[in-house]
């Protein structure tokens, strides 16, 4: 028998091992692989949020990087007429920061234990609101022009315009074309940020010093729908994105009006885009709708539905039409061209699933086709991929979108998506990048210039990609906790 002092030492060792090391506990039977998955999800979440925290800009810099943002790149993959040679620069825009903010807000609503999220939300929300113009939001900041846009002007004494922050545009034509009007996509994301902020402050019983009101937003979108138009975007015509659908249009403004539209007239205007008489011609300081024609984008429609649901406005005029339009685009399972500004085929499933998760139950039919497509197209290693021209198939970005979609649609056992989901999570684990800032993932294409530059002018961001991956991880962590009653102490 061991002497007493050795027994005491053994007891102390066992006490430290089993008393102080955090343990995963569950009242249900859980196999070791599930526990490992759960622990890895928690580790990636905490370290990923550390990366988001440490890389958020705390002050505005001289090169037009703004307080509250994360680094976003705008890059031309190859030389293009009027845009110049291949290049990549930092950019600031509403779509990027609002998307990141909204992902972080949704994580915090599920897991308020992540105390580093609220200050990130406050900083980014302040910047999002700078894109607001009246009741709508714009894609870009209002900034001084880079050059003269009219004869006789004095540089430094000109109106502000919407434009890229660091991407130098040379000609008058392309500078004027960049001065885009407000759009439904950014407006939906901006109002989503307001709604999520309201939910957080109410849940946390805090008073919001900014105090943005939850006004009705449906009238903003209902004014511009695909009805009774004397115009049609050539991309919609080319890719069969329909006509007179009643769905929501992308741009919040009046498009060029033909007496009688036909594709021949539209082509003639596009060929003569450099003439002031063309519908495509942009005029100095006048907010511009690209090509002079409003357009119909299925991803934009899904984003609008997400916002309307958060505001309890799913009885609005265009909602059922948008749902029918999305369902029509879902059925063929060909998603490469359903989004004019979204070249990755898996961004459509992601956007539809976000709307569904926000409460648009009538997207159930669309979800059936999308889930089938996601299961059918997953690679053996758990990944998905887009077309080769989109960032060399963009496997990580595609997988992040597809994973979020499957998790957002829920009912994993009934829909038989559990194995698909967990294979995707394991693939993403393997792509993580660990450094002094925490854990992050390399950014893929989440937006493009649309139409003729849809496959060459891309926006990418490590922060954007990391944020949507973390959102998926948080939602799946919640599922595991509820299913297996798991906790860590």
Image: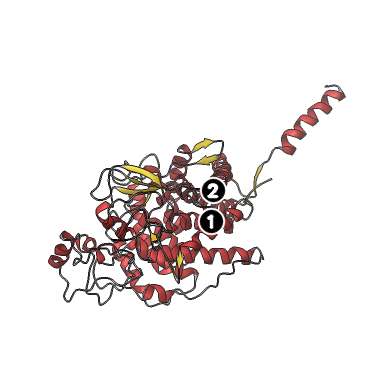
Residue at the spot 53% in from the left edge and 56% down from the top edge: 124
Q: Position of residue 1 (x, y in %)?
A: 83, 21
Whole-angstrom CA distance, mark 2 to mark 1, is 9 Å
Q: Is residue 486 visible?
A: yes
Q: Is residue 296 left or right of residue 161?
A: left
Question: Where residue 344 is drawn, which disc sits there?
Answer: none
Q: 158 and 23: which one is in front?
A: 158
Judge left or right: residue 422 versus residue 11: left
Nearer-the-camera pick, 428 or 342: 342
Residue 92, how many percent across, how many down?
Answer: 44, 53
Q: Secondary structure at mark 2?
A: loop
SS for callout 1 = helix
Residue 386 position, x and y percent, is 32, 47
Dividing the picture into quadrants, the one containing residue 272 is bottom left
Rendering quarter of residue 77? top left
- For the C terminus, give its image quadrant: top right
User: Between disc 2 and disc 1, whose residue precedes?
Assistant: 2
Residue identifier under label 2: 56
Camera sees residue 339: no
Q: Residue furthest right?
A: 4
The color scheme shown is secondary structure
Question: Horizontally, is 439 left or right of 392 in the view?
Answer: right
Crowding at dot 1, Cα within 10 Å, few <14 / some 14-19 / many 20+, comes out as: many
Query: Mark 1 = which residue?
Result: 124
Q: Are marks 2 and 1 in contact (CB under 8 Å)?
A: yes
Q: Position of residue 347 (x, y in %)?
A: 37, 54
């Amino acid at each position: 028998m061991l002497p007493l002092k050795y027994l005491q030492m053994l007891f102390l060792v066992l006490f430290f091992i089993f008393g102080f090391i955090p343990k995963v506990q569950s009242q249900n039977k859980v196999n070791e692989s599930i526990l490992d998955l759960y622990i890895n999800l928690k580790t990636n979440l905490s370290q990923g949020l550390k990366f988001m925290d440490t890389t958020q800009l705390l002050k505005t810099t001289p090169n037009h990087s703004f307080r509250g943002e994360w680094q976003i790149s705008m890059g031309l993959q190859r030389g293009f007429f009027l845009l110049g040679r291949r290049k990549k620069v930092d950019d600031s825009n509403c779509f990027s920061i609002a998307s990141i903010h909204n992902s972080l807000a949704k994580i915090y609503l599920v897991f308020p234990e992540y105390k580093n999220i609220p200050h990130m939300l406050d900083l980014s929300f302040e910047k999002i609101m700078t894109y607001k113009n009246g009741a709508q939001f714009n894609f870009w900041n209002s900034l001084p022009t880079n050059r003269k846009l009219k004869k006789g002007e004095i540089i430094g004494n000109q109106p502000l315009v919407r434009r890229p922050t660091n991407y130098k545009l040379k000609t008058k034509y392309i500078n004027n074309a960049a001065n885009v009007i407000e759009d439904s996509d950014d407006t939906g994301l901006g109002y989503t940020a307001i709604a999520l902020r309201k939910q957080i402050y109410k849940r946390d019983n805090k008073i919001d010093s900014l105090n943005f009101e939850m006004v009705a937003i449906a009238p903003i979108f209902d004014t511009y729908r695909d009805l009774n138009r004397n115009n049609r975007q050539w991309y919609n015509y080319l890719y069969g994105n329909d006509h007179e659908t009643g769905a929501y249009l992308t741009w919040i403004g009046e498009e060029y009006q033909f007496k009688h539209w036909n594709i021949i007239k539209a082509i003639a205007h596009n060929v003569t885009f450099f003439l002031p008489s063309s519908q495509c011609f942009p005029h100095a300081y006048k907010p511009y709708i690209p090509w002079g024609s409003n357009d119909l984008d299925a991803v934009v429609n899904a984003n609008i539905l997400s916002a309307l649901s958060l505001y309890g406005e799913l009885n609005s005029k265009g909602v059922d039409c948008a749902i029918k339009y999305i369902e029509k685009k879902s059925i063929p399972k060909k998603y490469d061209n359903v989004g004019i500004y979204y070249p990755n085929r898996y961004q459509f499933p992601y956007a539809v699933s976000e709307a569904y998760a926000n409460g648009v139950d009538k997207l159930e039919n669309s979800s059936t086709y999308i889930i089938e497509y996601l299961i059918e197209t997953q690679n053996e290693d758990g990944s998905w991929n887009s077309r080769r021209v989109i960032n060399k198939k963009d496997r990580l970005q595609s997988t992040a979108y597809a994973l979020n979609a499957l998790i957002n649609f829920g009912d994993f056992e009934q829909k038989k998506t559990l194995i698909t989901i967990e294979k995707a999570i394991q693939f993403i684990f393997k792509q993580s990048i660990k450094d002094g800032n925490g854990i992050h993932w390399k950014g893929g294409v989440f937006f493009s210039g649309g139409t003729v530059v849809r496959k060459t002018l891309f926006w990418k961001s490590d922060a954007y990609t990391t944020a949507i991956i973390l959102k998926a991880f948080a939602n799946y962590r919640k599922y595991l906790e509820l299913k297996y009653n798991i906790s860590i102490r």
